[in-house]
Structures are given as structure tokens and as C-alpha cells.
Amino acid sequence: MAGTTTPNAPETNRIGLQKKDYAGSKSTLCIGCGHDLITARVIDACYDLNIKPEQFVKLSGIGCSSKTPAYFMSRSFSFNSVHGRMPSIATGTAVANRTLKMIGVSGDGDTANIGMGQFVHVMRRNLDLVYVVENNGVYGLTKGQFSATADKGSKLKHGQVNPFHAIDLCALAVELGCGFVARLFAGNTKMMRQVLQAAMAYEGWRCWTSSARA
Ligand SMILES: Cc1ncc(C[n+]2csc(CCOP(=O)(O)OP(=O)(O)O)c2C)c(N)n1
Ligand SMILES: [Mg+2]
């Protein structure tokens, strides 16, 4: 985006910030985790959109995915809620301060299992929130049990087969009237950056789920 033209000067965006101004602390997730790719794209999108870190709030629930707000935008406000309750905290945040831009990061377990009730009601209320579901089909933090988005027939390490069909969070979001819905593979860098930017620029409720699976 709009960078400085002075030779050797670090590249900045329109509000004079460098990419590193959007960084967070070092990730403690497993090497190669798709969640870290999404973190990197959130940083890219916030830089590209010239978002002021001090006018941004990061919210999450519980899980490896919900730990990721610690890894971007360390100058922003942040609240790590209890499991599956991120939408309630987002609703309270919006009521308290309507000028802040919000992103909620959740997992498939945090959203489609324990937090399903919160997920559907936050859509019904059309909250101005970018809701990211980092969907790996398992409860990663507690060592890989099936979540409600796991494909029917998929197998765990020790051979257990999932007997239940998957809940499709994007289809549900569309059915509930969500204005911006997208599903992407976390490894698709270019498209992720563009779609996340579009989601952030959109006014109203958006649901963005990303899969660690192709
Ligand atoms: C009330 C409650 N129940 C269960 C747990 C245990 N627990 C922690 S994380 C987690 C699942 C997280 O899965 P997901 O949201 O898919 O995140 P991932 O780790 O896969 O990114 C569970 C069941 C908890 N912390 N709190
Ligand atoms: Mg998961």
C-alpha cells in the first residue's frame, strides 16, 4: 500500500505505521499450525486498511485459536473470555464503545460446540463484528477430540471414526441473515488477505471461517 518514498526508509502505511506496529507477541502454537497463518493475514489486513491499533479490540474464547489475539496488535484492547462466550463480550464491548473496531477469533469447538447458542444470537442481533472461526475440525488445545465441524467418517490418531455429520457454520450464517460470509483455506495467502480486508471494511455482521484443511 502507500509507502514512504525516501530510499532506505522503512515502509509505512497511510497513517505512518510499519508492519511491526501491528505485531503481537511470539506464537506458542505448534510449528506449522494454520492458526499462525491466519494471525499473519490479520496483521496484513489491519496494516493495509490503516487501522489505528488503539481503536481496535480483539476478543476470543478458549482454545489454541482463541490464544491467537495475543500474537497480533499488541497495542490494541483485548479480552480473552470463557469458552464459547466471546459473542457476549463483543456485544457488551459494542454497547460500551461504538467507535472501536472489533475482531472476534474463535475455534470450531469454541463456536460450533460450547458456543453455538451465542454464535446464532450474535448473528440475529447483527453485531458489527468480524467473527473468525479457525476451523481445524478438532479441539486442538485438549489434544484433538472431534468438534462438531469434523467430517463424518474422519479418523482420529488412534483410529476412532466420527459417526456424526458436520455442522456447516457458513451455511448456518447465511441462513441466519449474516451479510458477509466466506470460507477459505488458511494456506491461501493472497485470497485470505483480500477477503479479510473486505470483511473488515464491510459494515455489519460478517462471519469468516477458515479451514486448516484444503
Ligand atoms: C467450560 C469449559 N469446558 C471445556 C473446556 C476444555 N477446553 C479447552 S479448549 C477446548 C476446545 C477448543 O477447541 P477449538 O475451539 O476448536 O480450538 P482449537 O484449540 O482447535 O483452536 C475445550 C473443550 C474449557 N476450557 N472450558
Ligand atoms: Mg479446533
Image (cartoon, helix red, strand yellow):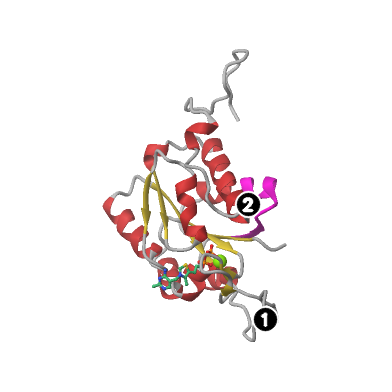
Q: Which portion, as a residue range, is magenta?
A: 182-195
Residue type, label 1: Lys
Residue 136, quarter of picture: bottom right
Question: For mark 2, what is the residue?
Answer: 31
x, y percentage for residue 148? Answer: 56, 77
Q: Residue at x 56, y 36 (%)?
A: 48
Q: Which residue is at the front of the view, 182 or 86?
A: 86
Which of pointers 2 and 1 indicates the residue nearer the eye? 2
Q: From the viewer's perspective, is 112 left or right of 191? A: left
Residue 121, given in percent of the width and then of the height, sits at 40, 71
Considering depth in this image, is 41 or 162 the residue closer to the camera? 162
- Numbered label attached to residue 87: none
Q: Label 1: state its secondary structure.
A: loop
Q: Can residue 64 be seen by looking at this rendering?
A: yes
Quadrant observed for ligand 2 in the rendered image: bottom right
Q: Which mark is residue 152?
A: 1
9 to 19, vertically: above or below = above
Magenta includes 38?
A: no
- Where the N terminus falls, by quadrant? top right
Marks 2 and 1, Cα distance to the nearest angstrom? 27 Å
* Amino acid type of the residue tagged 2 in the rendering: Ile
